[in-house]
Amino acid sequence: MSLRADIAGLAQRVKERDCRAVARIISALENDPEFAPQFIPALSPFWTKRPRLGITGSPGVGKSTVINGLVKLLRARGQRVGVVAVDPTSPFSGGAILGDRVRMQGVQNDEGVFIRSMGSRGSLGGLSVATASVVRVLESFGSDFILVETVGMGQTGFDIADIADTVALLLSPESGDGVQTMKAGVMEIADMYVVNKADRPGAEGLMIEIESLLGMIEDRLRWKPPVFAAKALEGEGMERILEVFAEHQNFLREHEQYEQRRLRQVTSEIRFIVESQIRRRSFASPDFRQRIDDLAGKVMAAEMDAYTAAAIIMKELPERLGEGQSQ
Ligand SMILES: Nc1nc2c(ncn2[C@@H]2O[C@H](COP(=O)(O)OP(=O)(O)O)[C@@H](O)[C@H]2O)c(=O)[nH]1
Ligand SMILES: [Mg+2]
């Protein structure tokens, strides 16, 4: 039976923790933007909100290693964990990343962990809106804790803060990952700064650099993001990440910011769904492209300016979008 033919049955299989069903659904969500609106509503009756921790940072800083360590800790606490890794540079390949110790304990085939790598659709580090749907599937799948790995901010503008409640920014001394080199916006979204590879020289200096940058923020009502060291390969600092995560969650609740964050996430999600649907139904349509080409010709012939051409397109947009939908 095709995926679409039995949406309710599939949703039930997700609820019953059928890993293969979840894997198929995630592929469909990634490959077919029209699948989400058909499938996601079927999940909502048993959609539960789970704690979501985002791990972000440049390639090679140790995000996957950290996630691996966190998964071990969370499993030891009896929590079921769902992991989404949006990292085109180093896909999370189960066996290679889950260490020997874990394999011996049989955690790799542990039903309590679901790890999924996703591509980032060309926009380096950008999350596609599909990631939000995948997280929702993992929540319905019964994951108590959601971890999301990304390489940072992309061009889409839909970023880790739009999915995770708490964002940990990972830095490492060896990647020449000085604070100055961080992309604008990346520093600001972090709720904690983890200087990984503290076994390497330069970690202290990096921590001081971050601290001094953060020292400028002094606002009691604002969460003060802690800066601390980790050695993910040795499992050091992983407990601290979970502690800070819990503290941050409490802070958000005490200051009535939790709902606010979720609301902001949903708002971004709606906005980006609309944007991506407009893009797909307009610019992807040959007819529409032809229309723009024609208008471009007029601009070239100095018959009108680009704004006038754009205004014409805007006027025609609703009708064209409607057509796209009925197809
Ligand atoms: N020396 C050292 N190496 C680490 C540490 N954590 C991770 N690594 C190594 O850094 C490399 C990149 O790690 P990975 O987790 O794949 O980074 P990601 O690209 O951010 O996901 C791997 O070779 C890891 O073994 C650490 O604490 N110390
Ligand atoms: Mg990785």
Image: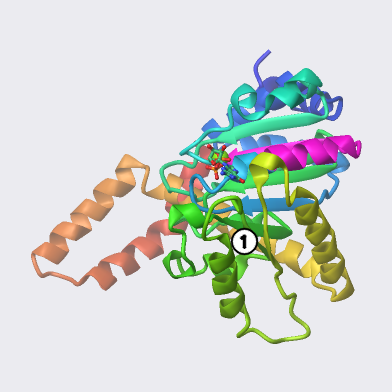
For the residue labelled by badge 1, is the local secondary structure a helix, a strand or a loop?
A: helix
Residue at figure coordinates x 13%, y 69% from the top left: 303
Question: Mark 1: which amino acid?
Answer: Ser
Question: What is the total number of numbered labels drawn onto the structure image?
Answer: 1
Check the image and report above or below for 215 versus 241: below
- The quarter of the displayed image where residue 94 is located: top right
- Where residue 147 appears, as percent x and y from the top left, is 71, 45
Residue at figure coordinates x 52%, y 56% from the top left: 201
Quadrant holding the N terminus: top right
- Where residue 204 appears, as percent x and y from the top left, is 59, 65
- Where residue 284 appears, as percent x and y from the top left, is 37, 43
Mark 1 Cα-neighbour bin, 10 Å: few <14, some 14–19, many ≥20:
some
Residue at figure coordinates x 53%, y 39% from the top left: 326
Pointer 1 residue: 268
- The quarter of the displayed image where residue 70 is located: top right
Q: Is residue 134 visible?
A: no
Check the image and report above or below for 252 versus 45: below
Check the image and report above or below for 45 versus 192: above
Q: Was residue 47 drawn as part of the magenta stretch in this picture?
A: no
Q: Is residue 165 left or right of residue 253?
A: left
Residue at figure coordinates x 46%, y 59% from the top left: 177
Q: Was residue 78 drawn as part of the magenta stretch in this picture?
A: yes
The span picked out in magenta is 67-86
